[in-house]
C-alpha cells in the first residue's frame, strides 16, 4: 500500500509559514498584542503588551484573559460582567471588536488603564474557533 502524503506535507509547511508570519507580526508591532486560545489563556504577548500592561511576558503568558484578576470597566465606569469582556464577546459572536474603550484594572495595580481594544477571532482551516488576537493601545485625549 502506498500513501501519498504530499498534501499533508504541504499543509504542514503552510501552517509553519503562517505561524512564522504571525510571530513576526507580534514581534514587530508597536501595538500591544495578545494571542489568546479558545479557553481565554494568553498564549503569546509581544513586547509592547508587556510594556503597556507592566507585566512580564512570563506573567502574561498563561494568564487567563477571563480571570477575575482582570477587572474591566465600560467607558462610563461600570464594572463589566465577565461575559461582556472583550474575549467573551469576540468568542461568542465570532465577530471583530473594533475600537472599543475599556478601563482595565491590571493585576496588582490600583489605577485602571484606559485602553482602546480591538480583537478578532482566529479560525482554524475548517472555520472553527481557534482563539483570538487582541491589539490594545492607551487611550489618548487628543
Image: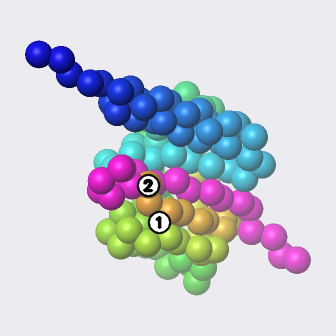
Instruction: Locate the N terminus by quadrant.
Output: top left
What is the span of residues highlighted in magenta in the rendered image? 123-142
Residue furthest out toward the right: 142
Whether residue 27 can be seen here = yes
Tell me the element at label 1: helix
Residue furthest out toward the front: 1
Q: Quadrant of residue 82?
A: bottom left
Q: Would residue 12 be counted in the magenta stretch?
A: no
Label ID, residue 76: none
Label 2–label 1 contact, CB within 8 A = no
Kindly report which numbered mark, 2 or 1, lies closer to the viewer in this rendering: 2
Residue furthest out toward the bottom: 76
Q: Would residue 125 be counted in the magenta stretch?
A: yes
Q: Is residue 51 left or right of residue 55?
A: right
Tell me the element at label 2: strand
User: Which residue is denoted by mark 1 in the rendering?
Assistant: 86
- Residue at x 49%, y 79% (from the top left corner): 78
Q: x, y percentage for residue 126? A: 30, 53
Q: Quadrant of residue 66?
A: bottom left
- Residue at x 58%, y 83% (from the top left corner): 76
Q: x, y percentage for residue 19? A: 53, 35
86 vs 96, nearest the viewer: 96
43 vs 17, nearest the viewer: 17
Q: Is residue 68 left or right of residue 139?
A: left
125 vs 84, nearest the viewer: 125
Residue 102's place in the image compared with 17, above or below, is below
User: Which residue is denoted by mark 2 in the rendering?
Assistant: 122
Q: x, y percentage for residue 113? A: 66, 61
Amino acid at each position: 500500500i502506498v500513501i501519498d502524503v504530499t498534501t499533508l506535507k504541504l499543509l504542514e509547511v503552510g501552517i509553519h509559514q503562517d505561524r512564522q508570519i504571525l510571530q513576526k507580526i507580534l514581534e514587530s508591532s508597536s501595538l500591544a498584542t495578545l494571542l489568546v486560545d479558545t479557553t481565554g489563556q494568553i498564549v503569546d504577548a509581544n513586547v509592547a503588551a508587556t510594556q503597556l500592561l507592566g507585566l512580564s511576558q512570563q506573567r502574561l503568558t498563561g494568564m487567563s484573559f477571563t480571570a477575575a484578576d482582570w477587572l474591566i470597566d465600560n467607558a462610563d465606569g461600570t464594572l463589566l460582567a465577565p461575559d461582556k469582556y472583550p474575549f467573551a464577546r469576540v468568542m461568542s459572536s465570532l465577530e471583530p471588536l473594533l475600537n472599543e474603550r475599556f478601563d482595565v484594572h491590571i493585576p496588582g495595580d490600583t489605577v485602571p488603564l484606559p485602553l482602546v481594544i480591538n480583537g478578532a477571532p482566529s479560525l482554524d482551516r475548517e472555520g472553527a474557533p481557534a482563539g483570538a488576537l487582541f491589539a490594545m493601545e492607551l487611550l489618548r485625549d487628543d
